[in-house]
Image: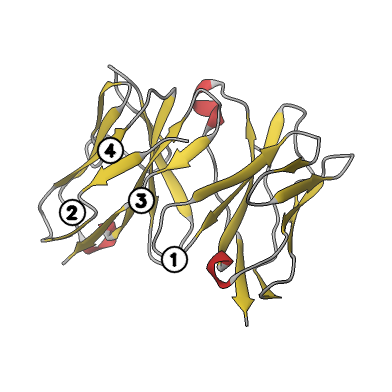
């Protein structure tokens, strides 16, 4: 799996959009970009994933650059409950053990009043 | 998404003893994994739990220390054997659905004294 690079930490004011960047310059054509978050003392929570098109769901939007070498997770209106460590992971589609997720250190997002 | 339960949710154990952690999913999944998260660290994959056969272990993890069973598509166990304080971690079960999205259980918090 390709490696990702994320900022160690970010702050965001409550109610504002949180934009979390991720670089994955060595991503392969069959690798998806996945985002998870881990709120303190809980298991990681799936947020969103995409291949090359931008994606949106009830939690967030995912913007992937045309060359697929970077992406941005957008939380449109951050709340205090969005304070967590956010992981950007690239992963092949379900092809057995190759589909396992490999976690980096993530970005610690702190949402403040 | 899948509903994943783990038992126990937490435990305090004496060194030299063993603990078996159970993972139950409410629907059929294609893959099951076990992860470990040491204090202040990111998640590390221990092994892939294979149905009806021996698990596939990652580098640094061995079957004698972390025996795994997966008797059917929705259930798996991880045993932490001959525990030492260094085994104090959160142990997480994870599954891949037919949709190819991977989900995580709530984790088992283990403290070894």
Q: Quadrant of the C terminus of chain B?
A: bottom left
Residue B83 is labelled as 2
Q: Nearer the viewer, residue B86 or A47?
A: A47
Tell me what residue is drawn at x 37 percent, y 38 percent: B3
Tell me what residue is drawn at x 53 percent, y 67 percent: A81
Give yes or no for contact between labels 4 and 1 (Cβ–Cβ under 8 Å): no
Disc 2 secondary structure class: loop
Left or right: residue B101 versus residue B68 is: right
Left or right: residue B58 versus residue A87 is: left
**Residue B43 x %, y %:** 46, 52
**Residue B52 x %, y %:** 27, 16
Return the disc, 2 or 4, that comes first in the chain's sequence. Answer: 4
Distance from label 2 to label 3 (Cα)? 22 Å
Tell me what residue is drawn at x 48 percent, y 28 percent: B97
Disc 4 designates what residue?
A: B23
- Respond whether the residues carrying marks 2 and 1 are from the same subunit: no
**Residue A40 x %, y %:** 44, 65
Disc 3 designates what residue?
A: B106
Q: Nearer the viewer, residue A92 or A61?
A: A61
- Respond whether the residues carrying marks 4 and 3 are from the same subunit: yes
């Amino acid at each position: 799996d390709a490696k990702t690079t994320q900022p160690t930490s970010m702050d965001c004011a409550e109610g504002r959009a949180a934009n979390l960047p991720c670089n994955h310059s060595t991503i392969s054509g069959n690798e998806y970009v996945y985002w998870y978050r881990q709120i303190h003392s809980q298991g990681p929570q799936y947020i969103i994933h995409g291949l090359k098109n931008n994606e949106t769901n009830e939690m967030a939007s995912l913007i992937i650059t045309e060359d697929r070498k970077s992406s941005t997770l957008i939380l449109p209106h951050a709340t205090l409950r969005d304070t967590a460590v956010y992981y950007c992971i690239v992963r092949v589609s379900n092809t057995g053990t190759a589909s396992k997720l490999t976690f980096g250190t993530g970005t610690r997002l702190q949402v403040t009043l | 998404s899948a509903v994943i339960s783990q038992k126990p949710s937490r435990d305090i154990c004496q060194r030299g003893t063993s603990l078996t952690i159970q993972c139950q999913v409410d629907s059929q999944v294609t893959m099951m994994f076990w992860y470990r998260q040491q204090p202040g660290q990111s998640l590390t994959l221990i092994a892939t739990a294979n149905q009806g056969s021996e698990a596939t272990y990652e580098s640094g993890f061995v079957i004698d220390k972390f025996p795994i069973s997966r008797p059917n598509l929705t259930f798996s166990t991880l045993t932490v054997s001959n525990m030492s304080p260094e085994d104090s971690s959160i142990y997480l079960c994870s599954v891949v659905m037919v949709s190819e999205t991977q989900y995580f259980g709530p984790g088992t918090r283990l403290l070894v004294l």
